[in-house]
Amino acid sequence: MKFICPKSELLNGLQVVSKAVPAKTTMTILECILVDCTQGCIKLTANDMELGIETIVEGTIEEPGIIALDAKIFLEIVRKLPDNDITILSDNSYQTLITCEKAKFNIAGKCGDDFAYLPEIERSNSIVVSQFTLKEVIRQTIFSIADNDNNRLMTGELFEINGDELKVVSLDGHRISIRKIQLKDTYEPQKVVIPGKTLNEVSKILSGETEKDVSLFFTDNQVVFEFDQTTVVSRLIEGEYFRIDQMLSSDYETKVTINKRELLSCIDRATLLVKEGDKKPIIINITDGLMELKINSAIGSMDEQIDIEKSGKDLMIGFNPRFLIDALRVIDDEQITIYLVNPKAPCFIRNEENSYIYLILPVNFTTV
């Protein structure tokens, strides 16, 4: 096999597929990136059996062939080569010569036949969204998935398609994030749970351009993302997702409209007094025209007031400040509305159209 490829092209392709190389595995072939030049293009593939990524890079094929190269070594060599064309040549014993200008590397490859190719997925059940929209939806929900496997469903996000609406839901037992998106076309109802790891990696690869689309194809147990010259295949998380509708009450006793940036900055300042891992709540006291925020810790205390518009009852309630910060950071509105019931019930941050809903459970606190 022999091909020539600009460094920038090859490096970008390797960085894209390396996201599917497992950190630990008993199958050494999975530590490799497959380079396939047998189909008239230079195709790079990595697969950890849960997530597989394939991308095509531009270049000139002089001799078709296929080889598996150690992902870590291959990526680091290419990263440190000069910014010029790279030539890759492998022989029948899989020895591979990588040259660029005056630099030459000789590394051992493996037979590509043992590599776990991406599964063939029937491309029938699909939706199309812009890269910008998908990247934003992931950013606005991914922070509230659970980071452990106690309940696998909580480590993924629900993608629910209904007609021309896509609803994305994530939760971790303390909060729920929901985003609703209008799709350009109408689709059959569909519900899948996509692993958070997959969505994180897809989000990193997406360019985020509004005029470029992503096609998502679903089967019973897999999802495929197709965009630009890249294909990502992932297993879905199996099981019935949580019934969240009964938690999403529209009843409230207190409604607060507040400047988002002011509230975010205030809570951010308060966390200066909270050590990593310390579970100190921020206590919010809501009265007519005023929200008072207090925090007390071993380091010190803070007290700040923000002007608000309020309707309904006065209320004092405590929250984990990080949960509020996570939600506020991803809301783009200048003014936000918070709906509350009592100190034991969750608060809702949502807009009038319900295109975003953030539910956060309160925490117990003691007033001094």
Image (tube, grey):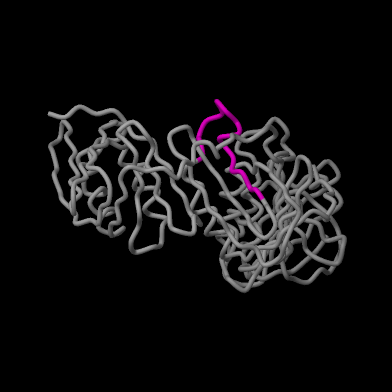
Foreground residue, 186 or 278?
186
Residue at image coords 51%, 57%: 355
Relative to 42, does residue 46 appear above or below in the rendering? Answer: above
Foreground residue, 343 or 125?
343
Residue 116 occupies quadrant: top right
The N terminus, quarter of image: bottom right
The magenta region covers 145-160
Foreground residue, 17 or 134?
134
> In the rendered view, does 133 fall on the left or right side of 48?
left
In magenta stretch: residue 159: yes
Residue 197 occupies quadrant: top right
Residue 98 location in percent, x, y?
Answer: 69, 60
Residue at image coords 85%, 51%: 122
> In the rendered view, does 135 fall on the left or right side of 233?
left
In magenta stretch: residue 219: no
> In the rendered view, does 323 fall on the left or right side of 56?
left
